[in-house]
Image: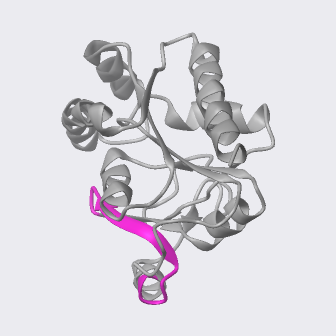
């Protein structure tokens, strides 16, 4: 990885993680709708799910192109999950922070841990379900994957809940009450920005 651990500027990188099925994307979509904040579009080698758009939901690229971009220092971090590669482009983060903007990186727990290991300066927020049973129920309702892959996600999600204690903040996303989770994250980000701008 060629990126520095810090970014120059008054803006803020927000790393938002949580187990699969907890509603990370829904929460971030709402945050972006209600503010001037942006979401970092990450790259992946996995196939698009129905309704996903290249350059909007992800940058869908081939494994060969992904490898080439690793070698070029394109990614802040990259990981392999369920046999697919995922990576976070560094340039948009650097540019947004320099302009004083908030940029939100939605990333799985494995990627969040990798960023911490690299010493990446950010506000780390973990989105948690109210309980394990509700998370399992959400994952089982997904019709985007076969049963074996979904079962693997359930097992991994249970293990990922332990990672919450390593994050700066934990926000619970209760079913049918997304506005509370969004409001909680907005308050956290505003406090972080206020603290940065005092200095």
The colour style of the image is one colour
Which span is picked out in magenta?
Answer: 70-83
Relative depth, front residue between 24 and 166: 166
User: Which picture quadrant has residue 134?
Assistant: top left
Q: Position of residue 61 (x, y in %)?
A: 52, 74
Q: Position of residue 161 (x, y in %)?
A: 26, 30
**Left of 183 or right of it: where is 152?**
left
Question: Does residue 120 appear in the picture of this structure?
Answer: yes
Is 80 one of the magenta-colored residues? yes
| Residue at 49% over, 89% down | 72
Q: Position of residue 140 (x, y in %)?
A: 33, 25
| Residue at 27% over, 14% down | 133
Relative depth, front residue between 133 and 15: 15
**Left of 144 or right of it: where is 51?**
right
| Residue at 81% over, 43% down | 36
Relative depth, front residue between 20 and 188: 188
Q: Position of residue 26 (x, y in %)?
A: 59, 32
| Residue at 49% over, 13% down | 175
């Amino acid at each position: 990885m060629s990126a520095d651990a810090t970014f120059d500027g008054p803006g803020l990188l927000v790393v938002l993680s949580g187990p699969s099925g907890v509603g990370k994307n829904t929460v971030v979509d709402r945050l972006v709708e209600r503010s001037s904040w942006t979401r970092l579009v990450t790259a992946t080698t996995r196939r698009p799910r129905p309704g996903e758009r290249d350059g909007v939901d992800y940058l869908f690229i081939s494994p060969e192109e992904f490898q080439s971009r690793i070698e070029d220092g394109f990614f802040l971090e990259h990981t392999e999950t369920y046999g697919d590669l995922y990576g976070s482009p560094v340039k948009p983060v650097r540019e947004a922070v320099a302009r004083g903007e908030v940029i939100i990186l939605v990333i799985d727990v494995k990627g969040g841990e990798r960023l911490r290991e690299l010493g990446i300066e950010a506000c780390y927020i973990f989105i948690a379900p109210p309980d394990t049973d509700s998370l399992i129920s959400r994952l089982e309702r997904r019709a985007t994957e076969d049963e074996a892959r979904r079962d693997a996600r359930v097992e991994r999600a249970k293990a990922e809940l332990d990672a919450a204690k390593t994050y700066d903040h934990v926000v619970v996303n209760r079913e049918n009450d997304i506005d509370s989770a969004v409001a909680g994250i907005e308050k956290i980000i505003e406090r972080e920005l206020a603290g940065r701008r005092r200095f």
